[in-house]
Structures are given as C-alpha cells and as structure tokens.
C-alpha cells in the first residue's frame, strides 16, 4: 500500500501503528485530500455548522456534489448522519464537504446553498455521495465528468434516492444492481435496461451504492458507517438520529397502489367482482367469465394493461385487502388471512412476507397506529 493511501496525521506525516492499520482496512485515500490553506471567510455555507469546516487529514472524506434542482432533504441527511460531531471529544466520523458552483446552487425548494469547494474537489475525496436529482432529467456534463473522474480514481460512489439517475447517466451502473425511489424504479429500468433495477431494496451495495427514496438514504448512510467504523459506531449514530440501526423489510411495504390508466379501466369492475369473493378460491376460467373474455384473451389483456398475469393480479389483490384490514381494523391476523382467501396462517404469512417484505404483525405495528 502506498503512503498516500495509508493516511497522514494532523501534521501531515504518514499514519503509523493502529491508525495506519485502520486506514488500510478501510482503504481511505487521505494523502491527496489535504485542502490548501484559504482565508477563513472563504469557508462559508456547507457543513460548517456540523462541527467541521475543513478537510481533515485523518478522517475519511465525503464530497457531496451539488447542482441546481437537487433535493434539500437528501443533501441534509448525509451532513447530519456522517458529518455531525455527535461526540464532541472525538468529532465527526467523516469530513463532509459540499462541492459545486461557488456562486450558489438552487435546491428543489428554492433555497440556495453555497458550496465550500468547486465541483472538481470530488476528485480528491474517498467517497462521492450524490443527493436526489430530478428523475429522468439531464444532470449536466460537469457533474457527469466529475463522477466518472472520481470513479476512475477509485473513490467510493454513492447515490441517494433519484441520485441513481445521475450515476446511470454517467455510465457507472451498467451491468450492476441498483435501486431508487419506488415511484421511479420502472422509469429507471426503461431508460437504462443494462441496469438490474431492484425496486424493493432499501439500499443496494454492488460496488456502487444506491438507496431507495427519501429516508432510506439514512439506512445507506448507516451502512457506510458500518463498513468504515464498525457496528458499534453505526448503532451509536442510529440512536442519536432516533432511527432503527437495521430496518425490517424493503420498499414494498411503503408502495401505494397506483390508479389504473384509462386503457385499463375494464379492471375496475373485475376488481369489484373479485373483492366480493376474496375469501374463496378463484380460477382463471371464473375470471374470464366475469371479465367477459376467454382465458387466452384475458391473459393477453392483463399482460398489455397491467404487466402481469391474471392469477398474480388476484394474489396481489388479496394482499392489498389484507394490508387495508391490518391498517384499519383490530381483527386478529389469522382471521384476516382467512378473509382474504388463505387456507392457513402459515400460507398467509409466507405470501405476505414475499409480497411486502415484512410479516403481517410488523406491518400492522408500522402502519395501523393501533398496535
């Protein structure tokens, strides 16, 4: 391992002993990230209120590139989770720096942020973390060049929420598994078919790291801390943030049923028919009679308008009704299973976990407000 990757101490000398070992294990690239001395008045905005206003020579560095239109929430999360000095004695776990147009960047709320360093500074960081960007919209050549350059230099590349679209546009996710906000997962897959999009995962670590939407960015930040500093450090930050160190399940438990397109309006009547008999078995032939189509035509219409098979749709409707009952009633979970057509509590729980990602009991605890 070369001296510039081993890290340096506060005096600019190579780390030794335990500190050097820690740097080698984590693979931090501290040597090249020492910031030049600048007047104090130049250190404005960014994370100065989070306990650090310069690039340390001992902590791993995280650069957050900013461009117009990024989401303020996803910018704030890593500043708080990674760059805040929760323990005054030891300081923050990372030196987190906002990089971009020094004249100011407008966020999605209209608020303007003044980055500490130019966009090119991402090339000096151990980790580059991209906040959410407007999905399916071009992010601009400067950010794409910076991301590609940082990746080529060995930086760890991370995206939160729809920041995944920026990594995809930069070509950093080709052939990899990735996730994004569940509302935009299908769009990401259509735009970039060479990516294996997992619309259920809270976060994915496939060499390049991506998170699901909004608060799932905190789950990924904890994963980074766990990688670099260990389980105890991640648990401590989770307690300070008042969140679970490990969340159960995946995005599926948060996905809302979307209204049908006009072309699929024929399903409204079929759904009503099914819900009247959701507690019993339903065959493909019975669905065809109710929809006034042959089984073959029905299968074709489902594939065309819904993107699934008739019987998978039936299974999804059973789970949708179960979710409603778990949220809105105090009915015993086993009884709910029978009411939506499952022959035993075991089969209901297995089907629910497969579809939603958590058990019926955990789903009720999270969403009913009654548990």
Image: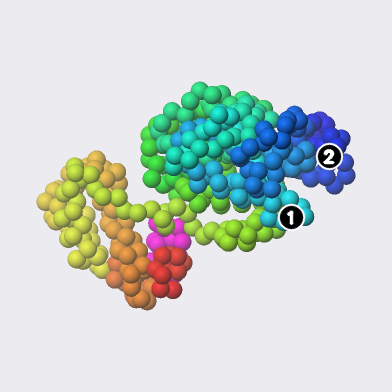
Magenta residues span 347-361
Of 135 and 267, the residue lying toward us = 135
Which mark is on residue 9? 2
Check disc 1 and report its element: helix, strand or loop: loop
Tell me the element at label 2: loop
Q: 87 above or below 119?
A: below
- Magenta residues: mostly which secondary structure? helix
Which residue is at a point 75% across and 39% down the rendered structure image? 56
Q: Taking 313 as reference, is 98 left or right? A: right
Where, by quadrant of the figure, is residue 321 drawn? bottom left
- Residue 96 lies in the magenta stretch: no
Query: Which one is in front, 280 or 147?
Result: 147
- Distance, label 2 to label 1, CA atoms, is 19 Å
Residue 357 magenta-drawn? yes
Neighbor class of circle 2 (other Cα within 10 Å; few <14, some 14-19, many 20+) is: some
The residue that disc 1 covers is: 88
Counting every numbered tag in the picture gives 2
Provide residue 112's location: percent of width, then percent of height.
50, 37
Q: Residue 225: percent from the left, percent from the top?
A: 66, 49
135 or 283: which is nearer to us? 135
Q: Is residue 11 visible?
A: yes
Q: Return the x and y of residue 128 as percentages of the image width and height.
A: 61, 36
- In this rendering, the answer to whether 246 lies above or below 191 is below
User: Residue at coordinates 82% horizontally, 37% vertically from top-left?
Assistant: 8
For the N terminus, the quadrant is top right
């Amino acid at each position: 391992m070369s001296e510039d990757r081993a890290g340096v101490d506060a005096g600019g000398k190579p780390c030794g002993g335990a500190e050097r070992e820690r740097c080698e294990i984590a693979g931090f690239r501290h040597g090249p990230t020492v910031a030049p001395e600048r007047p104090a008045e130049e250190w404005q905005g960014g994370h100065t209120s989070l306990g650090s206003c310069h690039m340390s020579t001992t902590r791993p560095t995280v650069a957050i590139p900013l461009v117009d239109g990024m989401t303020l929430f996803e910018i704030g999360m890593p500043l708080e989770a990674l760059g805040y000095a929760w323990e005054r004695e030891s300081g923050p776990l990372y030196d987190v720096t906002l990089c971009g147009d020094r004249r100011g960047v407008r966020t999605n709320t209209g608020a303007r942020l003044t980055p500490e360093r130019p966009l090119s500074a991402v090339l000096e960081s151990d980790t580059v973390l991209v906040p959410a960007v407007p999905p399916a919209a071009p992010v601009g050549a400067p950010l794409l060049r910076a991301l590609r350059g940082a990746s080529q230099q060995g930086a760890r590349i991370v995206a939160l929420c729809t920041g995944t679209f920026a990594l995809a546009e930069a070509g950093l996710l080709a052939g990899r598994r990735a996730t994004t906000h569940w509302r935009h997962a299908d769009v990401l897959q259509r735009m970039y078919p060479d990516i294996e999009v997992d619309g259920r995962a809270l976060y994915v670590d496939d060499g390049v790291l991506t998170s699901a939407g909004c608060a799932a960015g905190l789950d990924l930040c904890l994963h980074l801390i766990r990688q670099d500093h260990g389980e105890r450090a991640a648990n401590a930050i989770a307690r300070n943030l008042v969140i679970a160190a490990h969340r159960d399940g995946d995005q599926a438990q948060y996905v809302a049923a979307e209204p049908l397109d006009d072309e699929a309006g024929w399903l409204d009547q079929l759904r009503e028919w099914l819900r009247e008999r959701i507690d019993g078995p339903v065959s493909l032939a019975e669905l065809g009679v109710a929809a006034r189509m042959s089984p073959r035509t029905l299968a074709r219409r489902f594939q065309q308008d819904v993107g699934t098979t008739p019987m998978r749709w039936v299974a999804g409707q059973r789970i949708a009704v179960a979710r409603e009952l778990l949220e809105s009633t105090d009915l015993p979970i086993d009884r709910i299973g029978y009411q939506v057509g499952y022959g035993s509590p075991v089969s209901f729980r297995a089907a629910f976990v497969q579809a939603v990602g958590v058990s019926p009991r955990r789903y009720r605890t999270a969403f009913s407000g009654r548990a």
